[in-house]
Image: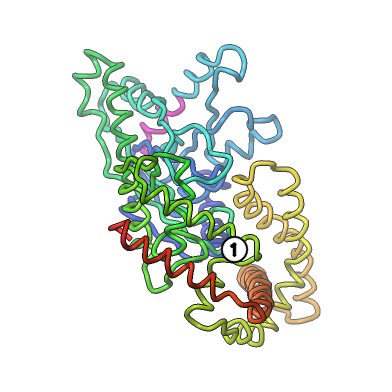
Amino acid sequence: MRFLYFFLFFSLRLSNRLYFRKRATHNSPRGFLGRTIYVSNHAASFMDPLLVASFRNPIVFFMTRSDIFKPLLKPILWASHMLPIYRQHDGDDTKGKNEEVFKKCSKILFNGRNLLIFGEGFTDDVFIRRLKPVKKGAVRIGFIALEEMNWKKKVYIAAVGCNYSDPNFMRSDVLISTSDKICLNDYKNDFESNPNKVINDLTKLIESKMRLQITHVEDKNWAPFHENVMQLTRKGMNSENYDPKLSLKSRWRYSQNLANWMNEKNLEETEELVGLKEEMDSYFKLLKRFKLKEKYVFEFQTLKGSRIKELSYMILMFPFALIGLIHCFVPYILIKRFTEKTFKRRVFWGSVKMLLGKASMGIFNLPFIFIFYNFIYPSYLVVFAYYLFVIPTCGLIAYLYNRFLVDFRTKGIIQKMDISKIIEKRKALLEKIKHIIPVA
C-alpha cells in the first residue's frame, strides 16, 4: 500500500462521515487482499472511487481514464493506486498502451491485490438511478491475468453497487453493496475453446449481478416518477424526504422493489400510472411555483409547522457554529464558487467540493496550530486533536446551522400562507399511490 493511498484510505473515512449522514455496506469483503476484480456502477463520477476504496477493506488499484494522467499529476495518481486506461479517441496505439497496463494489472492480481473498474465507462450528467451497459474490459483483464500466471492462482470478479440518496447533497446517505464472487478459473475449459463467448456471457452475468446491488429504473424518462413516489411515501432513498425510523437498508430495498415493479410494467400504456405521473408532476410544479419543498408540506400536515427543533438547534449550537464559521467559511465559499463555475456537469460537484474543501480547509487552518500552541494552550497533542477533530466537526455544525436557519425562516413565511389545498392534494396523491402501487 503506497503512502498516499494509505493516507487517503483513513482520512477519507472521516471526510465521508462528515459528508454523508448515514453510511452502510452490504455483503462487504472483510480482507485487505483477495485477487479480485471489483466492477462497480458509475453513478457519481469522482465520488464512486472515493467511497468504494475508503468504505470497504480491500486494497484496490483503480482503472482511470488516461486523459487525467498529466505530467504533473502522474506521481500523485501513481501514489493513489491509479492506472490509466486508453480509449480509441485518446490517440495512436491505444491497444499497445493498454496491453502494457494490462500486464501491470496481472502483476497486481498475482500479488493478491484487487482492481476496481467502473464497468459503465461514464457517468450521466444528472444523477439517475439506473445501470448503463457494462463493458467487457473487466472480464478480459481477468483472463489476461490468468494466462499470465498460467492459471496457477485463483482470480475472482464481483459486482459493486453505489447507492446514493443524492451524491451532491451534503448529509445525504449512501449504501455500498457487493455481490458474491465469481471464480474465473472455473471457466478455463470454456475460455480456451471459445474465449469471446465466455467473455460476453460473464459480462452479462456481472451486469445482472450489478443490477441486484443498485436501484435500476429501466426507462430513464420515468426516473422522476420513481423519485416522486419515494418523496411522498418517505420510504425510499430520497435525500430530504424519508422516515428517520426506517433503516438505510430498508429504504434501499424499498427503492429497489419500486423500480423492479416499474420495470415489469408497460408504463406508457397503463392509464392509471400515466395519470398518477401527471398528477405528481403537477403537484411538484405547484410546490416549485410557491417556493415550497415537499418536506415543509409534510411537516405542516403532521407538526403544524412547529419550529421548536430549528430554534433549539440554533440556540444550543451557536457557539460551535461560530467556531466552525471562523475556521471554515472562507475556504468553503471559495471552493463552492470555484467548483460550480468550473465544472458545468453537476455530477462532479459533490466529490470535487469534498476533496478540495478537505484540502483547502486543512491548509487554511495550518497557522492556527501555532497560534493555538503559543497563545491558548502549549500542548501539541491538544492542538492536533483540535485541528483534526474539533475544526471539522464545528465546520459541519456551522453548515447545518445555516440549513436550520433557512428552515426556520421558511416555516415562518409558510405559517402566514394558506396551504390547506396543497395538503389535501398531497393526501389524495398518497391514497392513489397506495391503491395503484402494491409495493408502496
Q: Position of residue 169 (x, y in %)?
A: 58, 58
Q: Is residue 124 visible?
A: yes
Relative to the observer, which residue lies in front, 28 or 430?
430
Residue 314 falls left or right of residue 222 = right
Q: Position of residue 33 (x, y in %)?
A: 36, 44
Task: Give the labeled residue for mark 1.
Answer: 287
Q: Is residue 106 one of those drawn in magenta? A: yes
| Residue that appears at 63% across and 46% down | 346
Residue 180 falls left or right of residue 231 = left
Looking at the image, residue 403 lies above or below residue 320: above
- Quadrant in which the C terminus is drawn: bottom left
Q: Give the number of callouts.
A: 1
Relative to the observer, which residue lies in front, 258 or 165?
258
Q: Position of residue 159 (x, y in %)?
A: 35, 40
| Residue that appears at 48% across and 72% down | 424
Residue 439 falls left or right of residue 227 = left
| Residue that appears at 39% across and 64% down | 235
Q: Which residues are magenta?
A: 103-113
Characterize the magenta stretch by its predominant secondary structure.
helix
**Mark 1, other Cα within 10 Å: few <14 / some 14–19 / many ≥20:** some
Looking at the image, residue 292 lies above or below residue 45: below
- Find numbered disc 1 in the image and state the secondary structure of the residue it sits on: helix
